[in-house]
Amino acid sequence: MPAVPSHAAEAARYALLRRLAPSFRHHLVVNLQPIGMIYEVMDRRLRASAPDLAHVQDSANKINGFAKAALNSCVDVIGWLAPDDTATVSVHDAVRECAALLATSLSFRGYALRNEVPELQGVVRRAGMRTLLTGALLHCTDHLPAPSDLVLTAASEGDAVRLAVDVRGNQGENSFRGEANYRPLEWEDLEALAAADGVQLARQEERIELRLPWVAATG
């Protein structure tokens, strides 16, 4: 288990969560917005002199599906805010969920995520992976110019996995470059987070590497 976080790690974690807040908001509302539209359609159908109950049932099923997805999104966001330190995840799945959370916001800023992480045997701590990977991605986009590709790769190295983020300039169009909703993430923030989560951290020019230990899988 990781040691009690330092004040620097807690401050860095707060800054990271503030930066992730817009992505959390999108993650929460994306399944809620369609419910209102489907309800309006269903309401009009029910007001007809002879409602088509098959269509009404179809609308009800869609609302139920989106409601379940919205509930899962709420539970997932709580997991980011108050992580279970015992939860484990495969590297491939962890990278996929982090990329899904950030891909839209990063694309607006001119950064394209390229997930080239293969399926690997073994699992890592979910909390550590989420924190360090999203932190590394935001740090890269805070300090390296767009348009760029953010290329994610990974390889197993004995008792750990090495995950790399490479920033490669591309010939894409300049995208919207709005002000960050909170302060930039500095390298010292990543170092504090890595120390708190037991992750080895290194950088070289436009590349950041994370080395996360394999752990025993939990149910």
Image: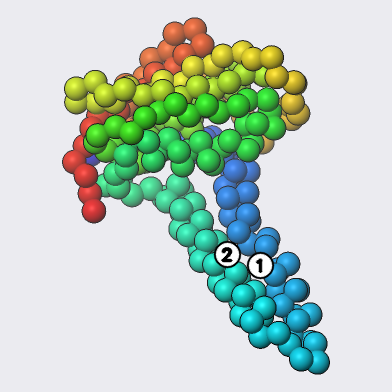
At x 69%, y 32%, the residue is 108
Horizontally, residue 8 falls left or right of residue 215, namely right
Q: Position of residue 193 (x, y in %)?
A: 40, 29
Callout 1 crowding tier (Cα within 10 Å): few <14, some 14–19, many ≥20: some
Q: Which residue is mark 2?
A: 66
Image quarter in which the N terminus is found: top left
Horizontally, residue 106 falls left or right of residue 50, namely left
Coloration mode: rainbow
Amino acid type of disc 2?
Answer: Phe
Q: Position of residue 76 (x, y in %)?
A: 46, 53
Under circle 1, the secondary element is: helix
Q: Nearer the viewer, residue 27 or 11?
A: 27
Q: Quadrant of residue 52?
A: bottom right
At x 64%, y 15%, the residue is 170
At x 68%, y 25%, the residue is 110
Callout 2 crowding tier (Cα within 10 Å): few <14, some 14–19, many ≥20: some
Most extreme residue toward the top is: 205
Q: Which residue is mark 1?
A: 35
Q: Quadrant of residue 59?
A: bottom right
Q: Is residue 5 above or below residue 143?
A: below
In the drawing, what numbered circle is on residue 87? none
Q: Position of residue 53 (x, y in %)?
A: 66, 85
Q: Is residue 134 above or below residue 84?
A: above
Q: Quadrant of residue 147?
A: top right
Report the Cα–Cα distance between label 1 and label 2: 7 Å
Can residue 105 be seen? yes
Amino acid type of disc 1?
Answer: Ile
Q: Are marks 1 and 2 in contact (CB under 8 Å)?
A: yes
